[in-house]
Image (cartoon, rainbow, N blue to C red):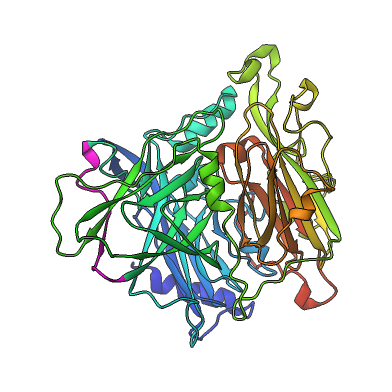
Amino acid sequence: MEFKKMSWVLACVGFMFLGLCKANGNTHYYDFVLTELNFTRLCETKTILTVNGTLPGPTITVRKGDTAFVNVHNQGSYGVTLHWHGVKQPRNPWYDGPENVTQCPIQAGSNFTYEVIFSTEEGTLWWHAHSDWTRATVYGAIIILPTLNTTYPFTKPDGEETLVLGSWYKGDVNEIIKNALATGADPNVSDAFTINGEPGDLVNACSNETTYRWVVDYGKTYLLRLVNAVLNEEMFFGIANHNLTVVAQDGAYIKPITTSYLMITPGQTMDILVVANQSPSHYHVASHAFVDGDVAFNNRTTSAILQYNGSTTPSTIPTPILPDFADGTAASNFTTQVRALASKDHPISVPLHITHTLFISVSINERICPNSSCDGPDNNALAASLNNISFVTPSIDILQAYYGSINGVYSANFPHKPYIFNFTGHVRNDTIYPYFGTKVRMIKYGEEVEIIYQGTNMIAAENHPMHLHGFSFYLVGTGSGNFDPNQAPKTYNLVDPPEVNTIGVPKNGWATVRFKADNPGVWFMHCHLERHASWGMATVLIVTNGHTTNTSMLPAPAYMPPCK
């Protein structure tokens, strides 16, 4: 684009003052231009915000340990931030991206350059908008290749493909959630799921010609990079007549799992080996929702076509047999197989001496409306909480307030445990209504942290995909019912638990994760179902500086988008 070279000259001049403009092969530069364009899906045309005019947006490709500078030019009509999902950003929360948590929005007509520091991640991650529901159309993949002179812990594939699952709404997504928050009702479900921006030929005739096609050669092995960018549903996924061998999740290698289907939550990524060993023809790649709660959801199936080179279209294209929408057993049968590779070349380090424990209840709630004037349960408004505290997003970002010692933006008293009740049994009325506020949890640098997420039976129990910024954590255990502190730890896997950044907390069950607090900064933690995050199912962890420069946050950049 015309301004690309000039924009990076200006960006490098700015970064030179911070000593960050690198001149080696490990630094990459990208221009992301946010523009509003017309797209036609499901026989209707609407205006959406895109990056560089595509859906999904551009893929970022780096090697392990590289750095990328992404200059975001906002030519849209409202403020936006971007988040680099799963990238730890060591000591660098300034560029993590969640709106009014680590930065204020990049206002329309302005630009901001992100410094994205890659460290131990290897495999597939993704980036997305972290403002309102803008990530419905502003998202893309991140490919992190092994360092030079190293390779994958499996035979190098003959080719690669990236598929991103998404949501498509006929209406304006930000208006949908705005109206839902105003009325207290559940927001409208999406009108279709997409694969690489296309609903596919199983939805309606308007999608037949634009269905995404993945062309393969018979006998070759492909590395499929799968991203779940869907807003509000976990997803089953499969390819007709082909096995999937999952070899990585969330940018870390796992012991290979060969399966006919998988379940992937919003926010998760998976690397999958697919062998093109079937009769050369066309085969459906398909995905539909996994929803085990009594909630509204999109029950359509999105599709792409795996097309063997030189083959002709059959009269009927085979479609994979996926588990039923509410098949929690099928979901669990897949997720409980995931184990870290834990090899000599890809070691893990599970914290064994816990010094900081958080027990966090994960709940759907109600917000009392005056005169019972809302459209949610009991004529109240739907809300959500962690430890019965519904997160309120401040008008000044928390990182700025913490770094600048600005009072009144947040309180550092997020509790280490909830009000105790029978979490998965009968729920009393006094547990339904949360406290609303901006409470954070302070954690000292170097502490070994354990978080026990406890699902609850409030309003509508379901699986919750919890995501923590700034860290990968080890999923050491899951179970059903109420967490038993005497018995549950005996079931923990401390040998090869998966190292991930997003985990599903089972419906009316619990999940335990561990990590070392070795990344100072302000880090958002939230459910990756967008409606739950919008209702307040979130909090912030602040990891304090250590005692040295190398264990402290990097200095504040010379420029951050101003708060308005």
Q: Could you say where residue 301 lies in the image, as x and y percent from the top left? A: 36, 40
Against 241, residue 499 (above or below) is below
In-front residue for pair 379/271: 271
Q: Is residue 73 magenta?
A: no
Q: Is residue 218 magenta?
A: yes
Residues drawn in magenta: 205-220
Q: Could you say where residue 384 lies in the image, as x and y percent from the top left? A: 67, 34
Is residue 209 something one can see in this rendering? yes
Q: Quadrant of residue 373?
A: top right
Q: Quadrant of residue 515?
A: bottom right
Quadrant occupied by the N terminus? bottom left
Residue lying farthest bottom? 149
Q: Could you say where residue 520 lies in the image, as x and y percent from the top left? A: 75, 65
Give the side of residue 66 with respect to residue 279, left or right. right
In-front residue for pair 385/150: 150
In-front residue for pair 90/15: 90
Give the side of residue 86 with respect to residue 387, left or right. left
Q: Could you say where residue 285 lies in the image, as x and y percent from the top left? A: 32, 51
In-front residue for pair 98/424: 424
Q: Quadrant of residue 392?
A: top right
Number of disc labels: 0
Give the side of residue 186 with respect to residue 362, left or right. left
Residue lying farthest top? 371
Residue located 15% across and 52% down the image: 313
Residue located 68% across and 11% down the image: 371
Against 380, residue 241 (above or below) is below
Is residue 391 something one can see in this rendering? no
Give the side of residue 544 with respect to residue 187, left or right. right
